[in-house]
Image (cartoon, rainbow, N blue to C red):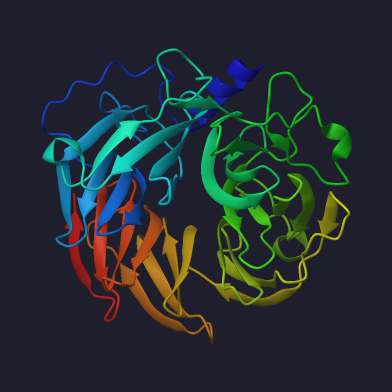
């Protein structure tokens, strides 16, 4: 069953499921379907997904943010089909969901790097690797799409991974680098995303479509969005159970797809709904650990803001809300206090801005352009285009 679902997951990406051959550098590799960037000091860490298998592998590479230059000498090969990753700056680790092998890959970064490099990357071996040839891969469930670092769980600091095909959340201890088995089903280890209404479907996949993971800063609950439903699941790190499922169907009807999610730290959540082409602002302060798991909750809606075509990512920073749009190659900028539109920023040559990254200390924001193999750079004060990194 697990292998069968893996093949479906690769097919959904519209690419071959053949294993990528051994990486052989040609000296010309640059960005290759980047899924995003994480800022560490004056560097940006980038994961190349190689989702079309146009190259021999995916890659880890760095950008010098002081000059907005791609550091080609830092590139190392990694498996293809990397997902939304997370960086632990305390342990200097990078955790990458690997859709090719249904694994969480663990890497280390060093600043300054080895061999005279400004920053370098290396594998971190794990106790029980998913395969002998993948010494840094921890097995998770089907089609892992994103990861989040959670410091205050039942198991201490963990990485939670959203698995799209099985509709589950895998939990990996950063101390032991092992996954905790939270599922009685022999083939899986993640917590199945269920509600009180579909609890009897534990042998099926009611939470299919699990996409992005975000922790609410006040309640510490972890929210899981979905590409295929109007339900946002809420995981309680203190007991690793499903605290609630927030159903947006009363607002969205038959239109589906919750994508990016952000919190303002003041008790409000901001969720991007692809089907509605809207940003939904809801009261997150009322969703707490009340001792009753698997509750189906109707959200308290504060506001609904119309967006453009195919909205994807959302970031809150510097008193502003940034929303990227895949369908019109743009970023809309809103005031956090009033929700008033401040600017519509359009990419010059970039395509599919999968992620927005704000570097307020450097006065810039970036978009990770998935299908144009580039990053676009914009001035944070004027919203003007600066350059493309490619």
212 with respect to 247 (left or right): left
Q: How many marks?
A: 0
227 with respect to 365 (left or right): right
Residue located at (35% from left, 51% from top): 37
146 with respect to 65 (left or right): right
Residue 383 visible in the displayed image? yes
Residue located at (57% from left, 73% from top): 264
Which residue extends farthest top? 132
State whether residue 79 is above or below residue 199: above
Using the image as rendered, state which of residue 359 and residue 196 is in the foreground: 359
* Residue 14, x across and y down, in percent: 44, 30
Residue 48 visible in the displayed image? no
Residue located at (65% from left, 68% from top): 218
Residue located at (44% from left, 12% from top): 132
Identify the image quadrant of the N terminus.
top right
* Residue 21, x across and y down, in percent: 30, 16
Using the image as rendered, state which of residue 240 and residue 375 is in the foreground: 240
Which residue extends farthest bottom? 338
* Residue 349, x across and y down, in percent: 22, 57
Using the image as rendered, state which of residue 59 and residue 149 is in the foreground: 149
State whether residue 48 is above or below residue 368: above
Using the image as rendered, state which of residue 93 and residue 299 is in the foreground: 93
* Residue 367, x across and y down, in percent: 33, 59
């Amino acid at each position: 069953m697990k292998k069968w679902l893996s093949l479906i997951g690769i097919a959904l990406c519209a690419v071959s499921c053949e294993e990528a051959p051994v990486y052989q550098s040609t000296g010309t590799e640059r960005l290759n379907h980047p899924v995003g960037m994480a800022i560490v000091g004056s560097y940006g860490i980038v994961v190349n997904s190689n989702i079309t298998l146009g190259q021999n592998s995916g890659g880890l590479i760095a950008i010098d943010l002081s000059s907005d230059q791609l550091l080609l000498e830092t590139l190392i090969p990694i498996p293809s089909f990397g997902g939304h990753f997370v960086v632990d700056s305390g342990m200097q680790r990078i955790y990458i969901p690997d859709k090719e092998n249904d694994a969480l890959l663990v890497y280390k970064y060093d600043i300054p790097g080895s061999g005279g490099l400004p920053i370098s990357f290396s594998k971190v071996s794990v106790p029980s690797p998913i395969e002998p040839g993948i010494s840094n891969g921890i097995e998770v469930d089907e089609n892992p799409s994103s990861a989040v670092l959670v410091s205050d769980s039942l198991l201490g600091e963990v990485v939670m991974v959203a698995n799209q095909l099985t509709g589950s959340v895998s939990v990996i201890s950063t101390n032991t680098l092992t996954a905790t088995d939270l599922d009685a089903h022999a083939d899986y280890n993640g917590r199945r995303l269920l509600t009180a209404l579909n609890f009897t479907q534990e042998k099926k996949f009611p939470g299919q479509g699990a996409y992005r993971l975000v922790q609410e800063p006040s309640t510490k609950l972890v929210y899981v969005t979905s590409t295929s439903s109007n339900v946002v699941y809420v995981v309680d790190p203190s007991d690793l159970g499903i605290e609630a499922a927030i159903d947006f169907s009363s607002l969205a009807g038959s239109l589906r797809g919750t994508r990016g999610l952000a919190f303002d730290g003041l008790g409000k959540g901001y969720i991007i709904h692809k089907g509605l082409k809207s940003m939904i602002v809801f009261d997150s302060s009322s969703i707490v650990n009340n001792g009753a798991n698997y509750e189906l909750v109707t959200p308290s809606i504060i506001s609904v803001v119309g967006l453009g075509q195919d909205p994807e990512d959302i970031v809150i920073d510097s008193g502003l809300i940034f929303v990227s749009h895949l369908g019109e190659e743009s970023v809309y900028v809103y005031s956090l206090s009033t929700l008033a539109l401040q600017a519509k920023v359009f990419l010059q040559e970039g395509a599919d801005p999968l992620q927005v990254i704000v570097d307020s200390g450097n006065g810039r924001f970036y978009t990770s352009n998935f299908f144009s193999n580039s990053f676009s750079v914009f001035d944070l004060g004027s919203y003007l285009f600066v350059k493309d990194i490619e």
